[in-house]
Amino acid sequence: MIGNVSTPSVFVYDPTDYPLSWLEDQGVKVTLGVPIASSGRHRRKWDPGELIAAAKGHEALLGASGAVISPEVMDALPELRCIAKLGVGYEVIDIQAATERGILVATTPVHSEVGVVAEHALALILGLCKQLHYYGPSYIAAGGWKDPERMARDVAGSTIGIVGLGTIGRAVATRAAGLGARILAHDVRQLGRVDGIEMVSLETLLGESDVVSLHVPGRQPGDGPLLGERELQLMKNGALLVNTARGNLVDKGQVVARLNDGRLGGYAADVYLPEPPPPDDPILSAPNVILTPHSAAWSRDVRRDMTQMAMENVLAMLRGQTPDSVVNPEATTRMRGNLV
């Protein structure tokens, strides 16, 4: 026990879609700030003041991207010791600020997520290549048929560039290679030789790829987009871009401009900045796009596995342990002690 804390507690700021009774069975009080189940409608992000008022007194936070955990939020929650993030992205959390304050942040890189996200990315790639954004029921009902200006692209023999060769990037590469594509990849880590994949610089990948697929973490506060004006200009004329990673990886204005003038042959995205995009967001009316509502990992198995891992992360961090998926282990040197 530390101070007056006898029963540590976690404030849950996003739906988990699975019960949290396991955590309660371990002696941790669970406070739900939202319904346990998703509604099918987007829930607005927490106002910082509302989040602070609701989470006051809790030692842990658990949620996805429904709140921005800024330095100001952390300072207003002096009892906060750890954050369990659902999913692998953590751009909504200021990691440097968390580390400076001794707050551990852990994500949920569950194995079950890898395959479903890779499948989604490949579906978007195929959808763009096969012109599924153009052909459809309304097109046929209006009298349209095979358009000579809208012939499909062959995946076999094409070059697909994978930016970020983590588990999901590798899974996409394996699947695309199975369709006969040449695979280029770029990663900030020095990975050396990877069978069946040509490791190249980002500039080479952008210049040679017919399709570019993004699989890297989102940008931290203050960072610019990974693909800004200069990088997008390096892409082949008419190339396709697929983003199932994070919306802030691309300069949306530049993407829309290149779609409108045809320099970008198509864009498929499951992620946006902001999320969800407002009704007047130009990406929603741009030509040659396929858009899905951040649903790549929207699977019952994945949600169950993420929730279980998040609960295990919370318990471990409250006990002063460091889960394998902690993104800022250096924060342990500043932690104030164990609570469980």
Image (spheres, rainbow, N blue to C red):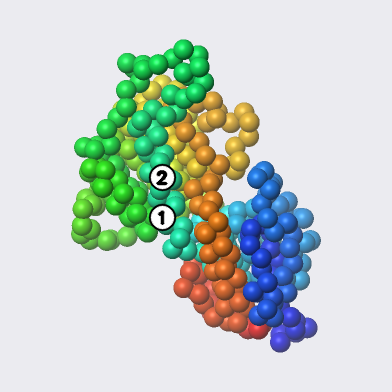
Q: Position of residue 280 (x, y in %)?
A: 62, 28
Name of the residue lying farthest toward the bottom: 1
Q: Is residue 286 above or below residue 49?
A: above
Q: Amino acid at mark 2?
A: Ala
- Classify residue 87 as left or right of residue 170: right
Q: Quadrant of residue 5?
A: bottom right
Q: Is residue 51 above or below residue 61?
A: above
- Classify residue 115 as left or right of residue 177: right
Give the residue pinned by disc 1. 115
Q: Amino acid at mark 1?
A: Gly
* Residue 218's disc number: none
* Residue 77 in view, yes or no: no
- Classify residue 281 as left or right of residue 231: right
Mark 1: few/some/many CA within 10 Å (<14, 14-19, 20+) = some
Residue at the (50%, 70%) spot, across then down: 326
Q: Nearer the viewer, residue 17 or 292?
A: 17
Give the residue pinned by disc 2. 121
Q: Along the polypeptide, which appears first: circle 2 or circle 1?
A: 1
Mark 2: few/some/many CA within 10 Å (<14, 14-19, 20+) = many
Q: Position of residue 57 (x, y in %)?
A: 76, 71
Q: Nearer the viewer, residue 174 or 242?
A: 174
Residue at the (47%, 25%) spot, across then down: 136
Q: Viewer-nearest of labels 2 and 1?
A: 1
* Residue 66 in view, yes or no: yes
Q: Position of residue 65 (x, y in %)?
A: 60, 53
Q: What SS does tag 1 mark? A: helix
